[in-house]
Image (spheres, helix red, strand yellow):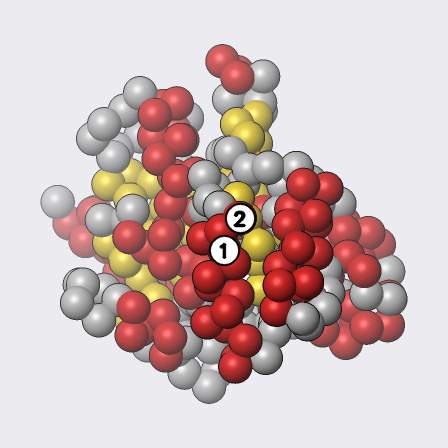
């Protein structure tokens, strides 16, 4: 139960807990160990709730989970709020804002959900029913990365429409400005009514910055070609650990080191 635990592991999924072939195997044993130690593993991802349910089942996790980049939190154990905390704005509302931004910058920004199956597979590597789970989105708006030269103008629009855009490795995410991964962590802390929580945060890209800023121990997970330099740059004045191996292997190593230290005490 998150209410009774003084340590939470809060982890991004894509590129952090698993690589881009969606393999969860490297981190599985470590997650089992955390469960034996009653340390919650709170997945915190841009994925949809439908996608995360499959992963939770695979990992035997029962802790609450943060989805759609912090726009919603779900979990059977969140009984006081009927299993959900919503921070974001509805998909249709965000779609309208994406269209308004497209008009202002005179460049059509394309929602991920508007891609054909083939295009979506090429971008994400997902096929079949996994595409349906990915499209079951309610509180955030992923879209194709715009050309870099438009970014300044897009940022001006974000202020105007009270939204934030996080650029991921493969796509960007439009969110209402009261929802991000960090704000979701705050909401979960508030819900748990537990002020003395040590958060170990793990992430791999700039959309994890709000998560890492809310963490007491920050772990950056590199990909096979090294860490996301944009994220490293944004963290440069803060203390953080850069995992020595990519994806799930880096995740496993760093969490195991932490567990070993705990067991020494
Ligand atoms: Mg990621």
Helix, strand or loop at disc 2?
A: helix
Q: Which mark is residue 181?
A: none
Along the line of sight, the residue nearer the viewer: 129 or 137: 137
Horizontal relation, residue 136 to residue 105: left or right: right
Whole-percent x and y of residue 142?
64, 58
Q: Is residue 35 visible?
A: no
Q: Position of residue 201 (x, y in %)?
A: 34, 52
Q: Is residue 218 above or below residue 231?
A: above
Q: Quadrant of residue 128?
A: bottom right
Residue 213 appearing in the image: yes
Residue 123: x %, y % from top left? 72, 73
Q: Are marks 2 and 1 in contact (CB under 8 Å)?
A: yes
Q: Relative to the observer, which residue lies in front, 16 or 47?
A: 47
Viewer-side residue, 204 vs 69:
69
Residue at x 34% of width, y 30% of height: 189
For marks 2 and 1, give the CA distance. Answer: 5 Å
Categorize mark 2 by other alpha carbons within 10 Å: few (<14), some (14-19), many (20+): some
Q: Quadrant of residue 178?
A: top left
Task: Point out the image quarter for the C terminus.
Answer: top left
Count residues near mark 1 (Cα–Cα under 10 Å), then give few for <14, some for 14-19, many for 20+. Answer: many
Image point 50% across, 55% down: which residue? 158
| Total number of numbered discs in the rendering | 2
Q: Outermost residue, bottom direction?
A: 225
Give the residue number, with chain letter if any, for mark 2: 161
Q: Nearer the viewer, residue 97 or 221?
A: 97
Residue 163 % position (x, y): 51, 49
Task: Write down the residue under mark 1.
Answer: 158
| In this picture, residue 165 sits left or right of residue 211 | right
Residue at (31%, 20%) from the top-left corner?
A: 193
Identity of the residue drawn at 63% across and 41% down: 139
- The N terminus: image quadrant: top left
Element on which disc 1 rests: helix
């Amino acid at each position: 139960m998150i209410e009774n635990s003084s340590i939470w592991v809060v982890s991004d999924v894509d590129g952090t807990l698993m690589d881009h072939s969606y393999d969860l195997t490297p981190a599985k044993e470590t997650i089992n160990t955390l469960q034996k130690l009653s340390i919650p593993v709170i997945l915190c991802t841009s994925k949809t709730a439908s996608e995360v349910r499959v992963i939770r089942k695979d990992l035997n996790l029962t802790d609450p989970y943060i989805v759609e980049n912090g726009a919603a939190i779900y979990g059977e154990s969140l009984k006081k709020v009927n299993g959900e905390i919503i921070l974001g704005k509805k998909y249709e509302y965000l779609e309208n804002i994406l269209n308004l931004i497209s008009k202002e910058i005179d460049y059509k920004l394309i929602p991920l959900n508007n891609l054909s199956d083939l295009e979506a597979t090429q971008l994400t590597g997902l096929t079949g029913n996994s595409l349906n789970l990915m499209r079951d989105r309610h509180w955030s708006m992923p879209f194709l990365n715009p050309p870099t030269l438009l970014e300044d103008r897009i940022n001006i629009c974000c202020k105007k429409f009270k939204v934030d855009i996080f650029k991921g490795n493969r796509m960007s995410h439009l969110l209402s400005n009261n929802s991000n991964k960090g704000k979701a962590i705050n909401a979960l802390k508030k819900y748990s009514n537990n002020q003395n929580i040590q958060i170990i945060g793990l992430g791999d890209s700039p959309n994890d910055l709000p998560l890492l800023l809310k963490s007491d121990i920050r772990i950056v997970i590199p990909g096979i070609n090294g860490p996301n330099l944009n994220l490293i740059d944004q963290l440069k004045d803060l203390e953080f650990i850069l995992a020595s191996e990519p994806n799930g292997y880096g995740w496993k190593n760093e969490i195991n080191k932490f567990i070993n230290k705990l067991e020494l005490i």
